[in-house]
Image (cartoon, rainbow, N blue to C red):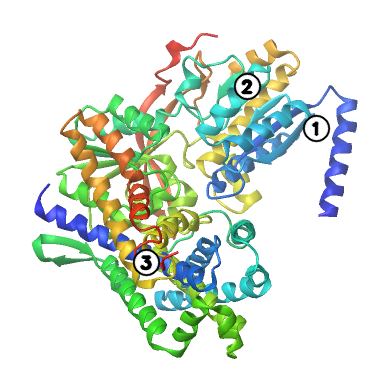
Amino acid sequence: MTATLFFEQLLNGLQFGVMLFLMSAGLTLVFGVMGLINLAHGSLYMIGAFACAAVVAVTGSFILGLVASFIAAAIAGVLIEALVLRRLYQSGHLDQVIVTFALILVFSEGTRYLFGSTPLYLDIPDALAGTVALPLGIEYPLFRLAIIAAGLVVAAGLFFAVNRTRLGIRIRAGEADREMISALGVDISRLYMVVFALGAALAGFAGALVGAIQSVQVGMGEPVLILAFVVIVIGGIGSIGGALIAAILVGITDTMGRILLPQAFALITDAASANAIGSALASMLIYILMALVLVFRPSGFFGQRV
Amino acid sequence: MKTIKKGLAAAAVLALIAGAANAEPTKIGVITTLSGGGASLGIDARDGFLLALKKANNPDIEVVVEDDQQKPDVAVQIADKMIQSEKVDILTGIIWSNLAMAVVPSAVAQNKFYLSVNAAPSQLAGKGCDKNYFSISYQNDNLHEAAGAYATEADYKKTFIIAPNYPAGKDSLAGFKRYYKGELADEIYTQLGQTDYAAEIAQIKASGADSVFFFLPGGMGISFMKQYAQSGADLPLIGPAFSFDQNILQAVGDAALGVKNTANWSKDIDNAANKAFVEAYLAEYDRLPSIYASYGYDTANLIVSALAKAPVSDADGFRAALESADFDSVRGKFSFGLNHHPIQDIFVREVIKEGDILTNKIVGTALSDRADSYVEECKF
């Protein structure tokens, strides 16, 4: 493999990692602050993508589509928080898993009812189409660079919001001791609604951005959900910085594993079986990574010790 | 809901009365995927099937439809229920090969007929074939073989081939290689359900290939083609029809324009049956039919034609009637091989734009009168 290809793949890994961060940022916020396991996070991601595709189809503006994805997912988030999840904060995680799994089914079939079962069309905006020449002769799609930029902006924004604002202080206080903060006069249920809406909006935003390079279809959120859980477990639940680092680590491990493992096996066996073994092992790689991280740091990189 | 139930009950009563008046009704169980990510395939197959029955207007045919959720265990449960409590005579509808492998062997072992509208894994065409199992669509390898034949004919010397790492993906690449005479730039397996192909596309661009063959069904193909076009790669793409279906093309957009794909049906095949099918489907459902709809439509017409010759209770007579394939296939030429899989032409299509709608146009024939590679292993 040439150096150019190697660095291009490294960039692909970074880009995939930032994409994973966008998908998991909302999840880690909700899970960390509210202690709520929300399997329907993937549905909010899907709602964002569908809202964006629908608005772009009517208006032709990708920016409006992004705004719509943010708002639609936030509204869906507020609704399910107020109508369903609010009753579940005191129950165990198993109840939350069952109820939010039911929400996945409701949202999937609801979306099918509204939009039909065929995938929707959503393309990248013309302004971000095409490729850019990077050093080493790498031709890289501009939109993927934009995804990296968007992910880093979201990371910085969340980091600032959690560490430098009054809302952030309350969020962190709620994370530490939710009885005490409500005793101090903070309206905890309102705080939770804001956090959940923010998490949902981030999921919707990610769905719209990533939907432009993938397939916008019913059920698109579920594969993402599994990866997002891997990311937040490795990063440490509730930690924005941890999620960013873990997402990039997972992205690079997955991408480089997919490329390098078949080539490594080709050194010791014939090409056909090297491809088969290599790609089978590559698909397990991030779970092996997760297991290894958990052996040495049971609460992930930045999780609170338990 | 209540009115629907009442309507159904009334229909059932009517069907019973009609049945009593004539011969015993034939009951067909359709098990297909109607929910989840793969639903559009099952919905189309069902709609095509029901359209043909509606046109045939045979009061002695009853149909039950159930959703398998693309899960083998659910499909097996439904099949058991349909066979044991609903007493169906014929089963059909399954889209996915892994579900077919879970349902078909036990259904035919209980002397039910199974007619496949799509899935046709090699196991059921070769050693595991059965006298009561028919595939109306193809044998799984067929469209990939045709793509290999097309790549050879187009004089590609160095094709990069890519498929997901699961049984149908491996069958696909094996099928392509069976008819491809050139050299392979590389052969890679991706993860099933993978959504990001940046790494694979970078490999393709660096490999020095002159063409790319890909089998990535459903959302995977949409993601791949969008990202391929966005990356600035411009090598010609070849694929089986699955990624170029009427429904999928609109989601891919202009990124699919000009791509060559292989199929045994296309809406522009010039025969009366096909014209009538496309028009009736458009009128009934307000959308263009997909390849799965055409398989469903042919399957139902085959059943209707066979029932006209022999009732399903006369198993040998009914089987012989199916074997004769005495119906007007929307594909034009259609007959069964000894292992009950089709012998048919497989075409090369090109993605074009008709007004604002992306669609396919036949540009040639890749394989004529193609049966399959497993027929010799099949002994009833």
Q: Quadrant of residue A178?
A: bottom right
Q: In what element is the residue under mark 3? A: helix
Query: Which quadrant, please, contains the N terminus of chain B?
Result: bottom right
Q: Amino acid at mark 3?
A: Ala
Q: Amino acid at mark 2?
A: Ser
Residue A12 visible (yes or no): yes
Query: Which quadrant, please, contains the C terminus of chain B?
Result: top right
Q: Quadrant of residue B141?
A: top left
What x and y, as percent, mark residue B305? 67, 24
Q: Quadrant of residue A186?
A: bottom right
Q: Amino acid at mark 1?
A: Pro
The residue under the point 61% across, 35% down is B73
What x and y, as percent, mark residue A120? 48, 60
- Measured in 3D between alpha carbons, the distance from the residue under mark 3 to the one under mark 1, in whole angstroms, is 62 Å
The residue at which mark 2 appears reads as B106
Please state which of residues A102 and B370 is positioned toward the viewer in this rendering. A102
Left or right: where does residue B266 sit relative to residue B78?
left
Labels 2, 1: front one:
2
Please state which of residues A264 and A73 is positioned toward the viewer in this rendering. A264
The residue under the point 56% across, 44% down is B278
Chain to which mark 3 belongs: A
Q: Give residue B157's mark.
A: none
The residue at which mark 1 appears reads as B59
The residue under the point 59% across, 14% down is B131
- Measured in 3D between alpha carbons, the distance from the residue under mark 2 to the one under mark 1, in whole angstroms, is 29 Å
